[in-house]
Image (cartoon, grey):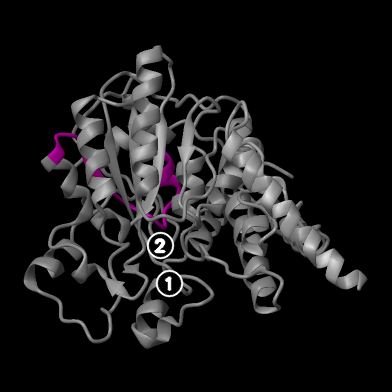
Amino acid sequence: MTESTAARKPRRSAGSKAAGTTGTRKAGSTGGGTGTGPRRTTRTAAAKKGSETELVQLLTPEGERVENAAYAEYAEFVAGITPDELRGLYRDMVLTRRFDAEATALQRQGELGLWASLLGQEAAQIGSGRATREDDYVFPTYREHGVAWCRGVDPTNLLGMFRGVNNGGWDPNSNNFHLYTIVIGSQALHATGYAMGIAKDGADSAVIAYFGDGASSQGDVNEAFNFAAVYNAPVVFFCQNNQWAISESNEKQTRVPLYQRAQGFGFPGVRVDGNDALACLAVTRWALERARRGEGPALIEAYTYRMGAHTTSDDPSRYRHDDERVAWEAKDPILRLRRYLESANHADEGFFGELEEESEALGRRVREVVRAMPDPDRFAIFENVYADGHALVDEERAQFAAYQASFAEVEGV
């Protein structure tokens, strides 16, 4: 696959000396707030107050750089970003969105069984994904297609599971990117355990775990917070707050902003504008660097919005207003960065035209690869269950082989 030149090398943050353990900052700019509110729900005063909490933002929805001393601790981590790197962030988001749209179309055409779209969350994923180093380890949910792109996972490999031809599609150790996790919130515990392990090994690396606002209510996530804090694990918890846990709004999830939950476990939390790729890059670099220095975990709440359905089996029109979506479309993460690139003369029409051609080529390749995916080996499920084999697995394999053979006998009659 084609990867942005913005992050092929180990990604040590510029400005890594910027220490700091307090994530809650009073901001001085506006933007990135909530929409008009969900249907059939009533905002309480506490929930309304939480939705108005200010957040770290380096690019406004109009594509203007934010100059605010309150963000200096984070802005330092992108102070030296080059026009080429900015174009790389934009390219990553455009191609990720194109891939996501193609996957959605393939599901509608019966080529995939299901698909979980990331539409609207590109900045949160690309910004945070490009903040990681090659030796960091990533634990995703099932929607981190943009992060997978940043880690060098071929996007077509993401589709095998949704087509039903494999149970993952890639070797997680090849890219330090774990297989997609369907069980809500369990990956937070896996990430914490892994982080505790690399800390004992003395490795100079960090772990990042992704989950959604709904998963933050799961016991697994809160147990992971506690273990990470007590053992000072080098892990970053990255919560993509897209406002809806399937059909349940934030008002049904929490009475305080999600990032403030970190305080109860003894580590810092930050709310960042999840539609601002530059801010997501900066804040995640900050969190990963402090984790590598041995300063423990951090929680990042990327305040964003799920533009589409939870999955292709969902109908969001049953539980939220269209005008809420329209309000968030004005904060589109891709349009925001494009405006900045154009206003700063960092990109011309030639760049955007070439990217459009690359985007179409990616869509064609995804269609061709998916439709050509072979049926899986029926006996592959018995492989790699145990490192050295197991008598019970051998017995089950033999029973399955006899079962399969019975069909051949019937057909031969």
The reply to whether residue 361 is in sight is no
**In the picture shown, does residue 270 fall above or below 81?**
below
Q: Residue furthest right?
A: 412
Q: Is residue 210 left or right of residue 218?
A: right
Q: Quadrant of the N terminus?
A: top right
The reply to whether residue 311 is in sight is yes
Q: Is residue 271 magenta?
A: yes
**Residue at 74% of width from left, 63% of height from top?**
363
Q: CA distance from mark 1 to mark 2?
A: 7 Å
- Give the numbered dot on residue 61: 2
Q: Residue furthest front?
A: 413
Q: Quadrant of the C terminus?
A: bottom right
Q: Which residues are magenta?
A: 265-282
* Image quarter of residue 197: top left
* Amino acid at circle 1: Ala
* Amino acid at circle 2: Pro
- Of 392 and 83, the residue lying toward us: 392
**In the picture shown, does residue 61 fall above or below 389?**
below
Local packing at callout 2 (Cα closer than 10 Å; few below 14, some 14-19, many 20+) is many
Q: Are marks 1 and 2 in contact (CB under 8 Å)?
A: yes
Q: Is residue 156 left or right of residue 295?
A: right
**Can you give x and y, in whole percent of width and height, for residue 75 in the image?**
35, 37
- Of 165 and 178, the residue lying toward us: 165
- Give the numbered dot on residue 330: 1
Q: Residue furthest top?
A: 202
**Can you give x and y, in whole percent of width and height, for residue 20 in the image?**
23, 27
**Can you give x and y, in whole percent of width and height, for residue 57 in the image?**
33, 50
**Secondary structure type for disc 2:** loop
Q: Is residue 45 magenta?
A: no
Q: Is residue 204 left or right of residue 356?
A: left
**Can you give x and y, in whole percent of width and height, for residue 408 in the image?**
85, 64
